[in-house]
Image: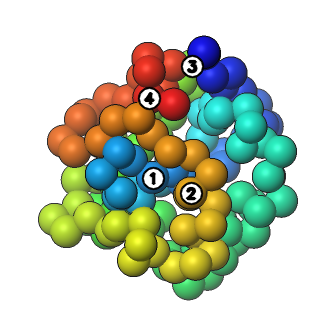
């Protein structure tokens, strides 16, 4: 079954999180997400606001403490922003982020993947 991917606010930036197949926290900036996540936008927005306040290093220049990818458009192609030396596991993530990240489970591990084609079996 194919997962429908959609951008909640085309033309606007937003951040969302997922957990990969090895249990690591993954941050995505912009681009489309699984449509089912969009029913939780209030939670995603609240998590992003919390992270910007309490984890500002997640949004700065590398090195960041988690796997981070960004999208430069509406296609589900995300390019890696950061390869963390010691990546953050979902189980070690702040609760405000972990609850939202757990909503999207990636079928693969991001490991050292440089580009995630979200519509190619990742969700």
- Can you tell which quarter of the image residue 113 is in? top left
Q: Residue at x 73, y 32 (%)?
A: 35
Whole-Å distance between the Cαs marked 1 and 4?
11 Å
Give left or right: position of 108 versus 106: left
Secondary structure beneath label 4 = loop
Residue at image coords 51%, 19%: 119
Question: Is 101 situated above or below 79?
Answer: below
Residue marked by disc 3 = 75
Query: Gap between marks 2 and 4, in whole Å?
Result: 15 Å
Q: What colour scheme has been applied to the protein in the rendered image?
A: rainbow
Q: Which residue is drawn at 52% across and 79% down?
A: 94
Say if 42 sits above or below 121 in the image. Answer: below
Residues at marks 2 and 1 touching, judged by CB atoms closer than 8 Å:
yes
Name the one closer to the observer, 6 or 1.
Answer: 1
Q: In which quarter of the image is residue 12?
A: top right
Distance CA(mark 3)–CA(mark 4): 14 Å
Indicate which label's residue lies in the foreground, 3 or 1.
1
Is the residue marked by circle 1 packed among few (<14), some (14-19), or many (20+) residues within 10 Å?
many
- Please identify, in this view, whether the residue under mark 3 or under mark 2 is nearer the observer: 2
Q: Tag 2 or tag 3, which sits nearer the N-term?
A: 3
Mark with earlier residue (3, 1): 1
Q: Position of residue 71 (x, y in %)?
A: 50, 34
Q: Do the residues labelled 3 and 1 touch (CB within 8 Å)?
A: no
Ranked by sequence position, the earlier of labels 2 and 1 is: 1
Q: Label 2: which residue?
A: 102
Disc 4 marks which residue? 122
User: Percent from the top left, x then y, of residue 13?
Assistant: 66, 45
The residue positioned farthest toward the front in the image shown: 1
The residue tagged 1 is 19
Mark 3, secondary structure of its residue: loop
């Amino acid at each position: 079954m194919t997962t429908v991917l959609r951008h909640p606010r085309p033309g606007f930036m937003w951040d969302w999180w997922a957990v990969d197949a090895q249990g690591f926290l993954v941050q995505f900036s912009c681009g489309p997400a699984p449509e089912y996540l969009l029913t939780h936008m209030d939670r995603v927005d609240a998590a992003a606001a919390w992270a910007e306040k309490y984890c500002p290093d997640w949004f700065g220049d590398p090195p960041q403490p988690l796997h981070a990818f960004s999208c430069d458009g509406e296609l589900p192609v995300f390019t890696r922003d950061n390869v963390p030396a010691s990546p953050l596991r979902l189980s070690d993530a702040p609760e405000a982020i972990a609850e939202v990240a757990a909503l999207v489970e990636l079928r693969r591990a991001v490991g050292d993947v440089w580009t995630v084609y979200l519509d190619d079996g990742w969700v």
